[in-house]
Image (cartoon, grey):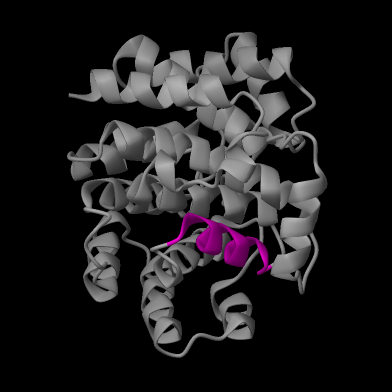
Amino acid sequence: MKSKFTGAMVGTAVGDALGAFFEGRSKIRIEDIEAIAESAELLVYTDDTHMAIGVAESLMRCGGFDGRDMAETFARNYEREPYRGYGPGPPYIFRMVRAGVPWDEAAHKLYRGGSYGNGSAMRIAPVGVFYRDKPEMLVEIARKSSQITHTHKLGMEGAALQAGAVALAVNLEAEQEINRHDFLEKLSDYVEDEVYRGKLSKIEEILEKPDKARVVAELGNGIEAFTSVPAAIYSFLSWSNSFSDAVLNAISLGGDTDTIGAMTGAIAGAYLGAGSIPSRWLDRLENRQYLEELGEGLWSISG
């Protein structure tokens, strides 16, 4: 179990760092991903992993979710490393939080109606492992943690769905073949909106007749939570026995490659454990030791 917790954290960072080379591109060849990754001296992660680190740090410090602490952790980490590729919205929210705006109100002031981007889903892996055996609480905490930056229902449900996928993956024995139908059926319990329920049905259809063009057209590969979380789940289920195949194929979908790579890496790492992540990537991953320490720390206090 400790390896699975660590795998979720490190898997997020590996998928993020590999995908960052190709963000916004389409028709990406797997051999090109491998070649560029091989040529990089250091695999550097983006805001996806940087915010997942903040989630983990806050959960560990507070022994669970504390909205104010998590929001302030995000703000503090951003101030230390603002170069991670943050979009324009979160820094404004962080400044509001630092100025005293309540953690669950700042995002409302910036986005009328809330954001349904994938920014809260990309960072949610620590919540998935920490609340792995408490599904109702997991959904509640995923939604609350999303509220710090993404308050639209589709943004919050995307975070809950991704956290649920990580939790299910952690609780499965990697030696056993995944029943894809059961996995997707259980995932439907984590969401209410028909947009996500429809995407889960589409995943099952496409898994029966794999087609990358159909994945992009019908599931999506964009920055919206409802177009990227389903793509990550599909990628994991398609190559669940291989961390590298799952992540490489996820990135090859194009679009928001760092986030889809990060979310796929989180689920695959949670299922297969840290030992499944190739050393050719681990050995050059930025802050690998700290990411492993966070995974181990979450495991040690999660009960």
**Residue 226 in sight:** no
Where is residue 249 drawn, in percent x and y?
Answer: 59, 67
Which residue is drawn at the image coordinates 38% and 54% (left, top)?
A: 161
Q: Is residue 208 magenta?
A: no
Where is residue 282 drawn, in percent x and y?
Answer: 58, 37
Q: Residue furthest bottom?
A: 209
- Viewer-closest of 271 and 203: 271
Establish if 60 lies above or below 253: above
Q: How many marks?
A: 0
Which residue is drawn at the image coordinates 72% and 58% (left, top)?
A: 34
Residue 6's quadrant in the figure?
top left
- Viewer-closest of 148 and 84: 84
- Viewer-closest of 87 and 249: 249
Quarter that holds the C terminus: top left
Where is residue 189 drawn, in percent x and y?
Answer: 24, 59
Type of secondary structure dominating the magenta stretch = helix
Quarter that holds the N terminus: top left
Residue 178's quadrant in the figure?
bottom left
**Residue 229 in sight:** yes
Establish if 37 lies above or below 137: below
Question: Which region of the structure is painted magenta?
Answer: 242-253
Q: Is residue 251 magenta?
A: yes
Please give left or right for residue 299 compared with residue 67 in the image. left
Which residue is drawn at the image coordinates 30% and 68% (left, top)?
A: 184
Establish if 71 lies above or below 127: above
Which residue is drawn at the image coordinates 22% and 53% (left, top)?
A: 172
